[in-house]
Image (tube, helix red, strand yellow):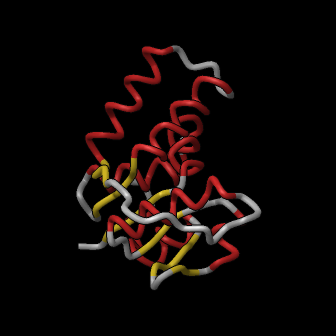
């Protein structure tokens, strides 16, 4: 089955604004592919929800529980230094490598600029939904 690692901004966009990032999470919940994450990604999501969006601790806990039900959490075993201009993004690549992901879905320009890493394609959520899911990308 297709294995996908989503960048932090995809999760934040899904939780805060909906749209295509939310559709990605819905498809993962429907087991159309395996969504993967790591403790570092989950920690960053929680921090952003608290700091930038002033979400309560209860809301953050509920979001983390929801994500833990739809995403497989992996433990990265190698350190990557592919992105020196935004080193925090290396955690996404580390997660994808540990998860043996086929695709990284991101809206981050640093990651998207790579195009691929270690055989893992890096693409925007809209492109992923269109290329990998096709007509399922459209919400009924």
Residue 140: horizontal and vertical position, in percent? 38, 54
Side of 129 relative to 75 (left or right): right
Residue 121: horizontal and vertical position, in percent? 50, 79
Nearest to the observer: residue 94 or residue 6: 94
Give the answer, above or below, for where 89 lies relative to 52: below
Name the quadrant containing residue 110: bottom right
Give the answer, above or below, for where 50 lies relative to 88: above
Residue at 43% x, 56% y is 24
Residue 32: horizontal and vertical position, in percent? 27, 63
Residue at the farthest right position: 85
Nearest to the observer: residue 129 or residue 90: 90
Side of 27 relative to 95 (left or right): left
Residue at 61% x, 80% y is 115
Residue at 58% x, 29% y is 49
Give the answer, above or below, for where 120 lies relative to 3: below
Side of 75 relative to 131 (left or right): left
Figure disc tally: 0
Residue 83: horizontal and vertical position, in percent? 67, 67
Residue at 42% x, 65% y is 78
Side of 83 relative to 130 (left or right): right
Q: Pick the quarter of the image with the N terminus.
A: bottom left
Give the answer, above or below, for where 58 lies relative to 87: above
């Amino acid at each position: 089955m297709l294995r996908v690692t989503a960048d932090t901004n995809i999760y934040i966009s899904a939780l805060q604004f909906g749209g295509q990032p939310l559709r990605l999470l819905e498809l993962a919940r429907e087991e159309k592919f395996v969504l993967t994450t790591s403790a570092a990604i989950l920690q960053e999501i929680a921090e952003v929800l608290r700091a930038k969006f002033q979400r309560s601790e209860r809301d953050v806990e509920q979001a983390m529980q929801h994500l833990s039900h739809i995403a497989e959490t992996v433990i990265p075993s190698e350190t990557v230094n592919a992105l020196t201009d935004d080193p925090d993004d290396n955690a996404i690549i580390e997660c994808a490598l540990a998860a043996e992901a086929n695709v990284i879905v991101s809206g981050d320009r640093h990651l998207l600029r790579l195009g691929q890493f270690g055989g893992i394609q890096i693409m925007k959520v809209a492109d992923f939904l269109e290329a990998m899911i096709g007509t399922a990308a459209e919400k009924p």
